[in-house]
Amino acid sequence: MMEFFDALGRYGFLQVAVAGGLLASLACGVVGSYVVARRITYIAGGIAHCVLGGIGAACYIRQVYDWPWLEPIYGAVVAALAAAIVIGLVSLRAKQWEDTIIGALWAVGMAVGVLFVALTPGYSQDLVAYLFGDIQLIRPADLWVIAVLNVIVLAVGLGFYRQFVAVCFDEEFARTRGLNVEAYYILLLCLTALTVVLLVKVVGIVMVIALLTLPVAVAGTFAKRLWQVMALATLLSAAFVTTGFAISYSPELPTGPITIILAGAVYLLVIIAKAIACRGKG
Amino acid sequence: MTVTAIDISDVSFSYDGLPVLENVNLRIEAGDFVCVVGPNGGGKTTLLKLMLGLLQPGEGKVSVLGQPPHQACRQVGYMPQYSLHDLRFPVNVLDVVLMGRLRPGLRFGRYSQADRQAAMDALDAVEIADMHNQPLAALSGGQRQRVMIARALAAEPKLLMLDEPTNNLDIRIGEELYELLGELNRRMTVVVVSHDVGFAPGRVKTIVCVNRFVKVHPTAELTAELLREVYGGDIRLVQHSHDCIERGCEGGRHK
């Protein structure tokens, strides 16, 4: 681990990676808290897997049509927002089809992505990085995109805090207060989509839901108000991301899985400790 | 001169072709304390949701405080059914009551000092202001119902609508809650949906019986005959309410 901090002082690419991880943690803590409170983790999972379709399509178009400005992350943003809006509309208009549609998008998004990556010469190595994450692949150019997405997510997510809390807590009451509940719901899914894109760089598509929910789950056992959960979850996810990176650095283990296992282990310890504490009291 | 709080004319409503309410005409005057009673599945909650603008009538017209329901929302306080809340949601009492200060056109930012003051006043009115920092999950059932009433009051409404406020409460706590509603009725019109008229003796002024059709009775007219007509041949109910009337209190209780 010391070796990691040594290297961090010396290598710019490591600093970029850590900065990216820390930035992503901000959005992760805020939006993750809404996702857990509103219980839409499964929707976040569906959006995450659709992202691969967008990444694959972007890689393909970039290579085949020679559009060097088309970064894969742009494709990811478009696919994630499209998935969020489709799932949101289905969930509002045809609730009974919701899980079917999410499941279908989940798998079809993956399939489209895998196909495009296979059709694109020289990208198959990247597929693994997108699926399982590789924080070291964050480049200075990505950092800008991550920063911009982060500003959007935080501004909207915190600016409309009152409305989101009300809509997540009691949709029907919020509607009687004259709030456009549907619009806020779709907006929340769009924020979730952007956050998922940020996190894909850090832990990969497959493990995004874990980083979105585990810090919130840990925070939720201590904090009693939603903004406190957000603050604590942000700190926790920043700690998980950096520590996961540090642990995996010297033995050259994949960073994403280490981060998730670390987060899972902390959550497990917290619930065990809580159960013991409750028994002690009772 | 009396002012009309709610005016429902020739309203019918059906779910997927199944009629729930038929040809409903109902007028509630300002200052009234209305208890909407009827069997489960009889259309009580549907009627309430029509008044709140959460549902649109298939036929007919609903008007609240002289406006379409969705426009009247700023002046209406609503308390939904108890079971709808997730107690793991991380909020404290004041957070919940502040939701009553939401209004159309609200944009970016935080609640103002005036909003906080109104929320604290609402908590004062339901006598739990000292609990404003407690997590919602730490409260008893009766206290939580008071929080939900405070949330409805925080909007400073002219009309208060409550859906089954005494569900899951023991009789004493339920009676205290009706006492509170009676107190609030001095300032505003109150409409309560309940399958439990028994909590309300002396406070409720009008009983609205809903079983697909709607009938209105001043509480003084409430008799065993009438309840039998509304609920069908529910013998236990009729005997129970009959006892109640013989003891000199108006209203009946079932379940």
Image (cartoon, coloured by chain):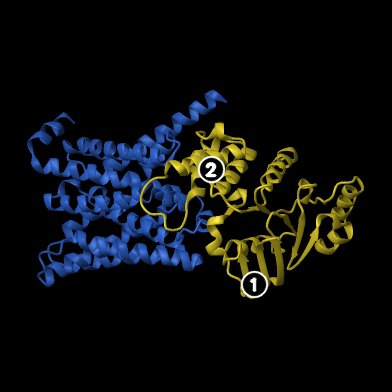
> Which residue in the protein does label 1 denote?
B14
Q: Chain of mark 1?
A: B
Type of the residue with mark 1: Ser
The quadrant of the image that shows the C terminus of chain A is top right
Q: Secondary structure at mark 1?
A: strand
Q: Chain of mark 2?
A: B
Q: Residue furthest left?
A: A10
Q: Residue furthest top?
A: A280
Residue A114's label in the rendered image is none
Dots 2, 1 in contact, CB < 8 A: no
Q: Quadrant of residue A17?
A: top left
Q: Secondary structure at mark 2?
A: loop
Depth check: B174 or B111 in front? B111
Depth check: A225 or B24 in front? B24
The quadrant of the image that shows the N terminus of chain A is top left
Position in image of residue A43 (x %, y %): 40, 57
**Above or below: residue A258 compared with residue A196:** above
Depth check: A93 or B59 in front? B59
What letter labels the chain drawn in yellow?
B
> Which residue in the protein does label 2 denote?
B87
Position in image of residue B13 (x %, y %): 65, 71
- Whether residue A250 sits left or right of residue A217 in the image: it is left
Q: Quadrant of residue A85?
A: bottom left
Residue A85 seen from this side = yes
**Chain A, which colour?**
blue
Residue A132 seen from this side = no
Position in image of residue A22 (x %, y %): 23, 42
Same subunit, tags 2 and 1: yes
